[in-house]
Amino acid sequence: MKSETKMTVRYAETDRMGIVHHSRYFPIFEVARADWLRKSGMTYSQMEEAGIWLPLCEAGAKYIKGLQYDDDYIVYAEMKSMSVARCRFEYEIYKMPEMELAATGFTEHGFTAPSLKPINLKKKHPQIWEKLCILMETK
Amino acid sequence: MKSETKMTVRYAETDRMGIVHHSRYFPIFEVARADWLRKSGMTYSQMEEAGIWLPLCEAGAKYIKGLQYDDDYIVYAEMKSMSVARCRFEYEIYKMPEMELAATGFTEHGFTAPSLKPINLKKKHPQIWEKLCILMETK
Amino acid sequence: MKSETKMTVRYAETDRMGIVHHSRYFPIFEVARADWLRKSGMTYSQMEEAGIWLPLCEAGAKYIKGLQYDDDYIVYAEMKSMSVARCRFEYEIYKMPEMELAATGFTEHGFTAPSLKPINLKKKHPQIWEKLCILMETK
Amino acid sequence: MKSETKMTVRYAETDRMGIVHHSRYFPIFEVARADWLRKSGMTYSQMEEAGIWLPLCEAGAKYIKGLQYDDDYIVYAEMKSMSVARCRFEYEIYKMPEMELAATGFTEHGFTAPSLKPINLKKKHPQIWEKLCILMETK
């Protein structure tokens, strides 16, 4: 299942090239990822309160077409794979209304306790593991 | 006593006007404020670990001359007043090497516990209170 | 006339205190200001293309209640005064759904050419001046 | 040749996990990249003024050990490859003083005109091309 988030470029996201600074796509992916998780019936905030943190192990982005101030765009996010220890999300950003591909990206996260120590999600939180599995496989 | 911090404008701090985005002066003030505190023999980090948090009550800035990418500048910071419940810092940013005034600003902070509940700094941490008083009055 | 913008706190806007970093209220005010301007039938982007820039002369904020990750909030923005050379916006942020006041702020802007040289908006762009006057006075 | 840049984590770079937000490593890489370029006798700013822009095509990072507020660290940057159309930088961040690897990353950039249209750097700016080649190969 892909989530879909509509957003608009903020002025503060641009740099002196006049386009969105490459670092600012990651907070955008993050908003989209939270929207994906929300579909499990649980917010990212609630996951953190339940003691499940998702710090990043790796992240990457490809910049295809620079977004500009006030551009409307849509972000698709999807959890692509998951093990008991980590998960991977992938993202696509399309400039609206023409739906031109602007950027793609991915993030890989470990499942950890608030101490940032790794946990086995399936063992520690089987119900949440189950929900995420179902959500990932839903078309 | 004024602290003095030399810094250089980062690309990511600029916006599409080609100057430093107005919001990004506040993290700069924050670096300067940490340098002022460090002179007390205690880092801001150590204050937080000791259970003293300094969340902001108020902040302001005047923008006189827009800083640009790669500009070197110097920030002067000073604690201007302090009560048992809060303190006020003031800042001046000068563009180097001509030492042209680029911006001024202030921040007001409450002294709180990590719960963000107000504390009486003088009663709760008399030694730190004393150190800050001395540092504030030192020429 | 006040504009009204609904937003949600992004993870990247928080700092290690667990609340929105004080600097990040200014990009939020900026989004709200753009929404106010949009009601004039002209986007901030179009104003810039017409050669009218609005760099900041001054900005300030009062922090009443720290917003946290995923909090929904509403920002009211309003142009409070305008001369031929500059204008002032004021903002109020309320945490939803209880509509608790979280922060207030203001920004003062000069009207300039893309060279950042001041312009007389009324003389240079009388139609835009007129539109903004009407919008400011509309209840 | 690797450049070496010493920096300290800013408060505003942390998020509510208490570590540097993953997006904020990219502005750090950018500072390091500018320091590498500076060794060519030309600043990134001067390159932009000469009409050579380096927008990003791709970027990535691996997060090994989360940096915390006030941590000192060192960033090594190096241009690893270059064609007439693009170049690739790689980065390593070590936490000081123990020199523990905290993160690695890369960025790939196109050479473009200010219009963001690709240019052939070797043809268009042979002297700069030459300088970068020498700098890249210097041990």
Image: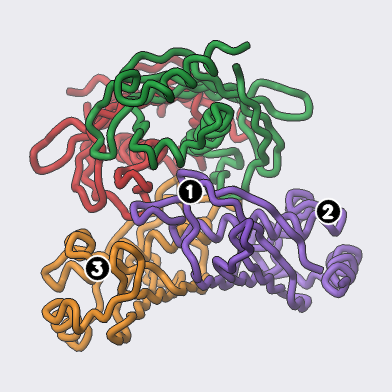
Chain colours: A purple, B red, C green, D orange
Q: Where is residue B71 in the image (x, y as percent from the top left)?
A: 20, 48
What chain is tagged by disc 1? A
Q: Of the residues shown, which amino acid type is indicated by label 1?
A: Tyr
**Depth order, front residue of C62/B136:** C62
Q: Say which mark, if any, is on residue A69.
A: 1
Q: Which amino acid does label 3 sit on?
A: Ile
Q: Estimate how packed mark 2 is, as few (under 14), some (14 to 19) or many (20 or more) residues with alpha carbons within 10 Å.
A: some
- Where residue A57 appears, as percent x and y from the top left, is 59, 71
SS for dot 2: loop
Where does residue A111 sit, x and y in percent of width and height? 71, 67
In the image, which disc is placed on residue B23?
none
Give the quadrant of residue A47. bottom right
Q: Say which residue label 2 marks.
A: A42
Q: Earlier in the sequence, mark 1 or mark 2?
A: 2
Q: Is residue D96 visible?
A: no
Q: Give left or right: position of A59 versus C99.
A: left
Residue at point 59% right, 48% down?
A8
Secondary structure of the residue carrying numbered label 3: loop
Circle 2 marks a residue in which chain? A
Between C138 and C127, the one lying in front of the other is C127
Vertical placement of residue D100 versus C13, above or below? below
The residue tagged 3 is: D52
Where's residue C16, x and y in %?
55, 45
